[in-house]
Amino acid sequence: MNKGVKIGVTGASAVLLVVGGIGAYNVVQAASGTAGGGGSDASHSFDPQTLSSEPPSGAKSVKLARTFLDSWSQRKFDRAAGDTDASATAVPALRGYADGLNLKSLTFAHIVSAGPSTATPGATKVTFDVTAEVAGGTWTYASAVAVLQSANGRTAVHWNNSVLYPGLGDDQSLTAGKLPTDTVKAEVVASDGKTDLSTFASLRDIAATIGKNAKATGGTSGTGVAVVDGTGAGVKALKVFTKGKPPVVRTTIDASLQAVAENAVKDSHLQAKPAGTVALDWRTGHILAIAHTGSDGDIAINGIKSPGSTMKIITSAALFDQAGLNPSSPAPCTDSLTANSQLFHNDPGVSANPGASIAQGFTVSCNTSFIKDGFHYLVHDGDASALHEEAANVFGMGSWSIGGGVATTDPSIPADVQGGDQAAQFIGQGQVTATPLFMASVAATVRGVGFHQPVILAGQQQATAPRPISAGTAGYLQSMMRTVATSGTAAPRLGGLTGVGAKTGTAEEGDHTNGWLTAYNGDIAVAALVEGGSSGVDSAGYVVRHLLTGS
């Protein structure tokens, strides 16, 4: 099949083709305006309405493809288009190919039959290699055409834009020279302006999403070949001759803290259980780190689980704001308690203390203390919406966009819970769900005395909470969370750390428990979830400690 023969704009080969009959054949064809044959007799031209039941032979298909490609290489666009089944469409497309690429020369090689076409039923596929001298350099690529045959035996190249380049859409074209800026892949970096987020395993998908959706700045265009759409906007670069400097999207991620978080979720104490953590700047809501392990996606921002006793932060705030209580108010800690016909117990190791206060119940994480007070003070005539209102109005619970098109799962504290869930919600069970992202924001709201919606792109508009947390309530919560860290349930991991407030949580899920811990120090707020963790302090506690100490 003469695989090594090249078709090109060379004077000798052009003369030989005309003398040999192929060129002359196409001249007649172009004059007649029909594909695959000459003359005005329609019986001798390609008829797209009466296709043959059999694809053309390989030899016949290659012969027509050579003729078509020879005309194309010589810029005889009318003649080349006459060998297609859509000459009126092919002519401007072929001319646009040459103009868009600033084409200097075009050659084809290795023109061979590849058997029946899978893309065009009834056609034979002919493959070939293309070498194009275009603005900026030499571009080579493999391509193919489909050759059809009508019932009268005449053949034609089936036309679509993929004849110009494989996969080129009908509304797309090619350009060469300076690459459109939107074909240059943006680099998504940390807040230092240089660390590529894709170097962190937990952030690769997030970086890819942000790169596609966020506005990049800076950068310089290189040169090459690109696909552009009907408006001239770049779609993708096909060939790069000279590299430019990619534009960047700067995020709020702290590269050093992110490195700590990546290691923290792999702490050996977790025994390879799925874990997720988020760290925030509590002053601004800027997301400083997101890390996770496990095969079910990013549980740091989408791991929607019952948050267990970490919800007692919001329950306490509701008792202070809506019931007028304070940390010294009674909250008896009994071994068990029945509410709406459902029996509740404390976690193992929590001793009964009938004279306990809210602060004492918070320190040891007594479930019955918060079910007793929550059900008594915050459920009125069957209306148990108080916790939902506190979470939405003070802690900003809602549908957040952290920026860059990154999907996150919203927390949920239903306003219309019924039955036993009316009590279970106060200890983060029942229908209450949250993510480490939300629980980190809860701790940040306490420490920063105000809600700042978490974002991963600085300058993005942030949602606001309808009602700021009061200084009094924030002060109460800070005091109680500090005691949890120094002498309460979080002390085994966080005791001795300066300026730390925390709350542990353990939530039942099916046949296992999930461990939670949320905390803050003078710089960050952080939350962690470990699926299957035995307790919050003995699972999530290790993760949180790493981030609070930066090691």
Image (spheres, rainbow, N blue to C red):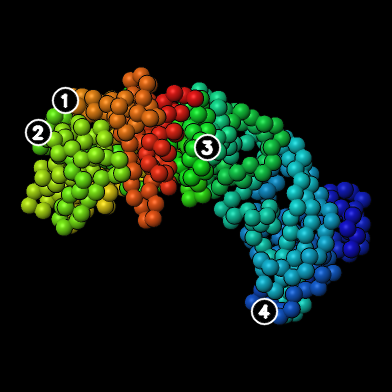
Q: Nearer the viewer, mark 4 or mark 3?
A: 3
Total tally of numbered discs in the picture: 4
**Residue, x 48% and y 48% (percent of image)?**
297
Q: CA distance from mark 2 to mark 4?
A: 86 Å
Residue 295: tell me if it is visible: yes
Q: Is residue 39 left or right of residue 471?
A: right
Q: Earlier in the sequence, mark 2 or mark 1?
A: 2
Amino acid residing under circle 4: Thr
Amino acid residing under circle 3: Ser
Q: Residues within 10 Å of mark 2 (few under 14, many from 20)?
A: few
Q: Earlier in the sequence, mark 1 or mark 4?
A: 4
Q: Residues within 10 Å of mark 3 (few under 14, many from 20)?
A: few
SS type, badge 1: helix
Amino acid residing under circle 2: Gly
Q: Which residue is more in the foreground, 181 or 534?
A: 534
Q: Are marks 2 and 4 in contact (CB under 8 Å)?
A: no
Q: Is residue 251 left or right of residue 524?
A: right
Q: Is residue 322 left or right of residue 413?
A: left
Instruction: Name the disc covering residue 268, or none.
Output: 3
Q: x and y percent of residue 350 in the render?
A: 27, 40
Q: Which residue is mark 4?
A: 50
Q: CA distance from mark 1 to mark 4?
A: 85 Å
